[in-house]
Image (spheres, grey):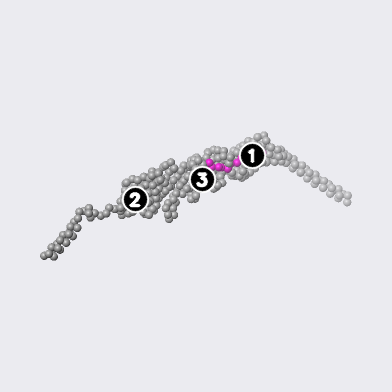
Amino acid sequence: MRATRWCAAAVLAMLALVVLPGDALAAPAPPVVTVEIATVPPVPAARFAINGTPMTTDGRGVARLRLPGSSELHRLELLTPTVDGPDGRAEFVRWRGSSVRHSGYDPVLPTLRVTRSVRLQAAFRVSRLVTYRFVDQAHRPVDLARVTGMTLRSDTGHLEELAGSGTMRLTAIRPSSGQGPVVATETSYAIQSVLIDGTNAVTSGEQRFRPNQVQDLAIVVRLHSVTFRVQDRLLGRPLPATVRLTYPDGRAVELPTGLQGEVSVAGLARGTYEVQPIGAGYSPPRELALSRSLYLDLAVLSRPDLALAGGCGALFLVGLFALRWWRARRRGSSGGGG
């Protein structure tokens, strides 16, 4: 009997342990973890949401949210894929981090699993407005209306075709990464061409700049001046005339000379032109490959030249006839004496 009572007491004790109050047997609370999002480059006021709970980046471009760690899937969403700020326009490119699955180029990560504290990177491309103007070698302003097009090449090899409007939006900072974290890289550009009057007025690749460091850009274009001197081909005297100048784009202008046969034209971009004096005699058009400022003599076969050439030709013919006549007479005299 005593043994039976001891067994019953042991069973009752075990049952008492089983039916303890619920709070005594409750599972330990899940750990609180931190989700940190760092924008690269730093983008203040970028807004995110995890399962609808908002979070905003601070002045250093970082946002944090604490939540219970679990194996459940969370929805992380970038609410502001484009952020306009005083430092430019930031546009989302991709996510980076150990918790990011697949490519990570979508602003929404629907299957984010947070079992421990994680740090994610949100990479942005930052573009800035750059105002630009054109000057010549002496830094005198050049009329923007003369520029019909401009081409830039970035250090990534991308070409930008622009009109000469005076303002351009360019990528200033781009995200780059290998196998490690994303880093912000400044973008540089080289000026490939500036079209003025149908020809390139710059040396390709000579002028470079970074939009992150300059917002007012002075672009130097190479312009030259030419003084045309029209003169008589045979006599060498100056002749008043009109010089027809054809630009590389096919546009032609007529430039009247002064009494000394000279006319100057400035602001010519380097390139191939055609020039011809008219109105003072005959002169065929000639090609002018302009690469520097110069004086150019244009020889014209004038009417006095034609008259002089005709007179010389007539004298030559008369002389030739007289010489033949004299030789014939001499031969005849020699034959008669025999």
Tag 1–tag 2 contact (CB < 8 Å)? no
Label 3 vs label 1: CA separation? 35 Å
Q: Quadrant of residue 251?
A: top right
Is-magenta flag for residue 228? yes
Image position, residue 333 (x, y; %): 86, 48
Q: Is residue 152 visible?
A: no
Query: Which residue is at 52% across, 44% downward?
Result: 150
> To which residue does mark 2 refer?
34
User: Element under label 2?
Assistant: strand
Looking at the rendered structure, the kind of residue marked 3 is Phe
Disc 1 target residue: 227
Q: Name the residue tied to disc 3.
A: 209
Earlier in the chain: of badge 3 and badge 1, it is 3
Task: Tell me where residue 321 appears, x and y as whole percent.
Answer: 78, 45
Q: Are marks 2 and 3 in contact (CB under 8 Å)?
A: no
Q: Nearer the observer, disc 1 or disc 2?
A: 2
Nearer to us in this view, 67 or 165:
67
Q: Earlier in the sequence, mark 2 or mark 3?
A: 2
Left/right of residue 338 with respect to residue 112 in the rendered view: right
Badge 3: residue crowd in 10 Å (few <14, some 14–19, many ≥20) = some
Residue range highlighted in magenta: 218-230
